Image (cartoon, rainbow, N blue to C red):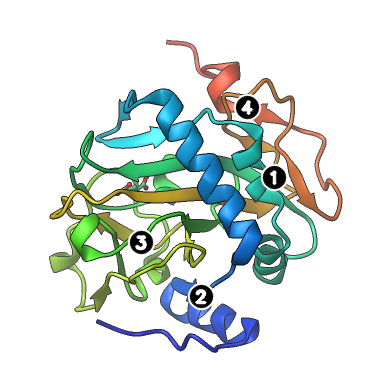
Amino acid sequence: MTTMDTSSPLADICNVYRQDGFAVVRGALTGKVLARYVDAWTAFAASIDGRREIDGGKTQIWEFPDDLDRMIHEPALVTVATNLLGPDVCVYLRRILVKDTTYSGQVETHQDAAYSFGNPDKLLCMVALSSCGPDNGGLWYVKGSHRFGLLGQGTIDPERFPPMETVCPVLEPGDVLLAHSYAWHRSEPSRNMAPRVMFNIFYQSASDGNFTSRRAEGRPPLVAGQWRTDHFWNRRLAGKIFRE
Ligand SMILES: O=C(O)CCC(=O)C(=O)O
């Protein structure tokens, strides 16, 4: 397994991201900031008491309190996003991806760009709120796979492509896995059922007003710069755009 240089400055991390399609920022959130989010998750998880929607073969939590949602504005994350996407950045989606004793299944190799809308140049941030690794169903990414561009929906068979290394970065709370929305990834069943909690934010250029949110939002949250569009579409609340 490839290990990342934990002392890389942001520029180096961005270069690894461009080269491999993913990279890790160690300790992006630390101290009281991190503790606030971990506590907010712990309180929220207790309040929903294991009740989760299994959606698309995985546990995705789309609705959660503002004290977790606030993470989309964290300067450490927004700084990475502006470095990779330019000065004007908004949020395409945010959700919490969980594996634990309630759900511990696997997700086959795919790319997220095939399931999202608007500009595919989206930056996925997976902020670890627990330890995440191969033993508890962590994410495996295929190095360089983003270079094949948009392949469409469904399971991708890496055997049909030239050999590429697949790695499962081990994350500790506060670490962030960055990934391009073209990057192929999968997750294996949890072996030890220890909670694997990732707060997942998709950032995109603020020239793109497509988004998906269950909140009553007319436009996605702007986290840096200014709007570069006045066309907004919340796929989840606004419904289908095609006649059947
Ligand atoms: O939660 C997981 O293990 C996988 C999630 C994922 O790959 C996705 O939603 O694109």
Q: Which residue is mark 2?
A: 26
* Label 2 residue SS: loop
Mark nearer the viewer, 3 or 4: 3
Label 2 is placed on what type of residue? Arg
Residue 76 in the figure: left or right of residue 186: right
Residue drawn where x is 53% and y is 45% of the image: 39
Q: Quadrant of residue 31?
A: bottom right
Label 4 is placed on what type of residue? Asn
Q: CA distance from mark 2 to mark 3?
A: 12 Å
Residue 122 in the figure: left or right of residue 217: left
Q: Are marks 2 and 3 in contact (CB under 8 Å)?
A: no
* Label 3 residue SS: loop
Q: Which residue is mark 1?
A: 208
User: How far across and down, in percent of the image, does residue 98 sit?
Assistant: 35, 43
Choose the circle earlier in sequence order: 1 or 3. 3
Question: 237 and 168: which one is in front?
Answer: 168
Q: CA distance from mark 1 to mark 3?
A: 33 Å
Image quadrant in which the C terminus is located: top left
Q: Which residue is mark 3?
A: 131
User: How far across and down, in percent of the image, does residue 61 sit?
Assistant: 43, 33
Choose the circle earlier in sequence order: 4 or 2. 2
User: How far across and down, in percent of the image, does residue 16 sit?
Assistant: 49, 82
Label 1 is placed on what type of residue? Asp
Residue drawn where x is 64% and y is 84% of the image: 11
Q: Quadrant of residue 170?
A: bottom left
